[in-house]
Image (tube, coloured by chain):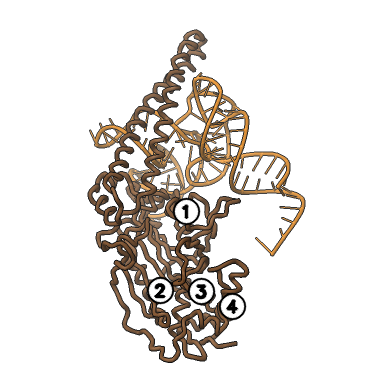
Chain colours: A brown, B orange
Amino acid sequence: MLQVATIEKEFDRCVKGLQKRGIEGAEILLKDALTLDEQRKKMQGELDEVLHTSNKLAKEIGLLFQQGKKEQAEKAKTQTSELKRKSKSLGEELNSIELSLNKLLYNIPNIPHETVPPGKSEEDNEVIKLSDDNKPNLGAHKKPHWELIEEFDIVDFELGNKVSGAGFPFYKKQGARLVRGMINYFLDKAAEAGYEEVQPPVLINESSGTGTGQLPDKEGQMYHVEANDLYLIPTAEVPITNMYRDVILKEDQLPIKHAGHTPCFRREAGSWGAHVRGLNRLHQFDKVEIVQVVEPSKSYEVLDQMVAHVEELIQSLGLPYRILRLCAGDLGFTSVLTYDFEVYSAAQEKWLEVSSVSNFETFQANRLKLRIKNNDGKKELAHTLNGSALALPRIMAAILENYQAGDHINIPDVLHPYLGFKEIRKS
RNA sequence: GGAGAGGUGGGUGAGUGGCUGAAACCACAUGUUUGCUAAACAUGCGUGCGAGAAAUCGUACCGGGGGUUCGAAUCCCCCUCUCUCCGCCA
């Protein structure tokens, strides 16, 4: 969430940022936050004062008892009851103000970066890079991947329907191998780039969901295990970033770099439709995620590095791609600046989003209480970033479509060592 | 799942109602001394909030929440986590 200090110091920038996102009454919203914070401070002061006199009295009473001056002690006791009532009511008031303030702040999204283009929807995203035109000329062989996977028997949606439901496919035979191979390849590349591998839990508690900003904003998008009040992760970002919740890092521990593979679970409530055939949108999919925790002054440099890493991955697979700078309207709730990567899937003739790389600045860190103590002993919130490197099913879709060759499907060279085969053939 | 024991500062660990925000030790930081390293000595060393230019002061925090009391790390209740034994189990 936003820091009150930021709202106060950079009020105009915050207002403009929220307006860019299309938020109505941004100014009023932010002013409310400031007013509540003022009230909070005032209340805190009053409460502290009452508690101070109350504590002082209690000590005196203790002394009087020890000195055997019971009457005086009893007399002093009567004074405390009034103070107690007062502190209780002040405490409750303070509590409710803090609650309102938090609720307000939790529902205000991050302020977009100055370079974020205005706009309402994905159509307004800015294409900042288009790969060299290596779109394959498919000629006679131009089947969408949902036909190919059936033909080569490598993904089974029917089976998934039977066992789980729509959006939970089975990968089979060379398809299953391909998934496993890509995961290993992506993880190896991340390791090469200095990311320390972790294998996090895929169920997380409410605090973690709140820490990275999925809760309360995206409550309905996560699967919820009610019996234990746990959520299935929508991305490894959540458990990995939450490793550092309530942590004060020393300057020399930075940067923190982690990579992890997990399945990701998304309810995709309301976004289901005919346009999401095949592997284009799933309730469960595999993804390798990279996460960094860095000093504020370095976060944009790091964002560029992460973008470069993802770009290199996609290039190595030989897929046509483009990089988008998300417009304000399409920008995630917690993000300041996000670059999306899309690969071109040649048979369906569609761009598919396969990665999203974001800088959250202090937005998550503020929720997480993730701070850095520098060498002078000063504390400040860290910056957090993450990116997909990469999400598997759409990469798979693009590979299948772009590399199809009639009776077989070629596989990008870099994956050969991970698979034990160089092409997919009918079994 | 059953029974028991426990969660105290970065770590070990003392502390069963007031003088304990918390002993001691370790770790860490700075300084002194020693030719360097090591050692010794000295000092410092938690977090949030509020006030202050700052020094500092006030307040809260001993797993979380509530209660008893003039006063709670210490007593009571609920939750949670960890450990041990038993059961079950990949």
Rendering coords of residue A117 (x, y %): 26, 63
Which residue bears the numbered disc 1? A219
The answer to whether A335 is drawn above or below residue B71 in the figure is: below
Which residue bears the numbered disc 3? A184
The answer as to whether the residues below labels 2 and 1 share one chain is yes
Q: CA distance from mark 2 to mark 4?
A: 23 Å
User: Image point 39% across, 53% down: which residue?
Assistant: A364
Alpha-carbon neighbours of circle 3 within 10 Å: few (<14), some, or many (≥20)?
some
Q: CA distance from mark 1 to mark 3?
A: 31 Å
Q: CA distance from mark 2 to mark 1?
A: 25 Å
Q: CA distance from mark 1 to mark 4?
A: 32 Å
Left or right, A307 with reference to A418: left
Q: Are marks 1 and 4 in contact (CB under 8 Å)?
A: no
The answer as to whether the residues below labels 1 and 3 share one chain is yes
The kind of secondary structure element at disc 1 is helix
From the image, state whether disc 1 or disc 4 is nearer to you: 1
Alpha-carbon neighbours of circle 1 within 10 Å: few (<14), some, or many (≥20)?
some
Q: Amino acid at mark 2?
A: Leu
User: Image point 31% across, 44% down: which residue?
Assistant: A4
Which residue bears the numbered disc 4? A172
Rendering coords of residue A128 (x, y %): 28, 72
Which residue bears the numbered disc 2? A352
The kind of secondary structure element at disc 4 is loop
The answer as to whether the residues below labels 2 and 4 share one chain is yes
User: Image point 34% across, 66% down: which residue?
Assistant: A122
Q: Amino acid at mark 3?
A: Asn
Alpha-carbon neighbours of circle 2 within 10 Å: few (<14), some, or many (≥20)?
many
